[in-house]
Amino acid sequence: MTNEAEGSGAENREAEELHRRYSRRGRWRQNLKRLVRLFNWILVVQLLSGAKRFLDIAGALALLFALSPVMALVSVVLALQAKVLHRTPRVGRWCETFQEYSFSAPETTVGRVVTGLRCRRLPVLLNILKGDMSFVGPSLISPGELSPRERAVRKRFNVRPGLICLWWIRRRANIAYGGEVESDGEYVDTHTVLGDIGIALRAIPAVIYGEGVATAPDLVTILGIRLNNVTMTEAVETIVERMGGNGSQQICFVNADCANIAYRDRDYHEVLQQAGLVLADGIGLKLAGKLLARDIRQNVNGTDLFPRLCSALSSSGMGLYLLGGRPGVAEGVRDWLAREHPDVKVSGYHHGYFTPEEEPEVIRHIADSGASLLLVALGAPRQDMWISENLERTGVRVAMGVGGLFDFYSGLTPRAPQWIREMGLEWLYRFGQEPGRMWKRYFVGNALFLIRVIKARFK
């Protein structure tokens, strides 16, 4: 028995020693795998960074070569009147300050010609070649413009600033709803070489759309329709304010198709004229504003406004009623709200396929719900005409027609990706989803709208 016990103890000690040995070996292998993964990650980052830098150098050299006659001519002309280059201090990668190059623009005929021909910023290609900047990156800032103490600001300095940035594109497409720092942070978190190429391609239509609007009249008129020229933030604040006020207000969204309908339907035109708030929706209105020299501040469409409005209504106690869409669609929007904005009160909902005989009961249900906001998704112009006729009987403070919004938030119809919206081509994406229904509206209707705008411009 003693010999057996001693043998058993020796075997246990040997097993423990083997276990410790293999445990150390296993830990060593795990650490080695971690080091390999870290090395691979660093290698990938360096390769991607190298590829981006290679594209910057190649692109800058190609453009400098192609544009060298123009730059040489401008330099000679400017040298006769003033200094050639103007230097602007900027904050670059790792918070290092550099001088951004541009042609001087003296207050002379030559300076005005240089500015008018869009030649002034051509020397910035030298900054890209030097490595101060990249073709695509966060927006350029001057020293002291942003505090690097904020985390959201700090991370933008991990990469080179760009000649083109997301904020610049979104401002020109009238969808710069967030802030500049937010757009820069989004770029830093998601940028890739292919993504940069995509941003550069999206800059092409952005040039056509023109500069973003800093200031513009509060009211503009396009094809006889009075539009409240507000930003997305201002629209949300106005809606919430009126929901808490007295009386009832109708809010309408107007896009190119609505303008076409109002052009030939005087009753619908009158409804738009009497609405408490009329918002410009879509790239068509922006282009019309440019042609008529009446700039539209932002594309205030219902689909982008809805989640922002829900955030503003969270825990307010003011309820909303969902009316419209196919059977089951309004319930889908209610479910989306329960997931994304659980503090928003849904007072009731009903599909849009009710008969004239059922309409009084639907209106009674809305009034009994105690909702402050009524969203009506019946399509234009029916939804706006319906609101105009029944607003007082519903008892709500604010009612607005929202078109296809319910289809998007119920999951029935996917929304166009962000990059398509930045190019102002959401209408083309919608055509691809429903070509049989949308071809006339977008290809015939949009052309007719622009013809009418051009005629109005030259009257």
Image: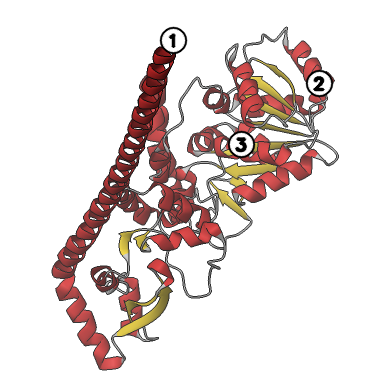
In space, the residues marked 3 and 1 are separated at their CA atoms by: 79 Å
In space, the residues marked 2 and 1 are separated at their CA atoms by: 87 Å
Residue 132 in view of the camera: yes
The amino acid on which the numbered mark 3 sits, given as a three-letter code, is: Pro
Say which quarter of the image contains residue 46. bottom left
Sort mark 3 into few (<14), some (14-19) or many (20+) by Cα contacts within 10 Å. some
Give coordinates of residue 327: x percent, y percent. 60, 11
Q: Residue at x 38, y 64 (%)?
A: 161
Residue beneath disc 3: 307
* Residue 311 falls left or right of residue 459: right
Closest to the camera, between mark 3 and mark 1, is 1
Residue beneath disc 2: 369
Pick whichever of labels 3 and 1 is earlier in the sequence.
1
* Residue 443 falls left or right of residue 251: left
In the image, residue 153 above or below residue 36: below
Residue beneath disc 1: 1
The amino acid on which the numbered mark 1 sits, given as a three-letter code, is: Met
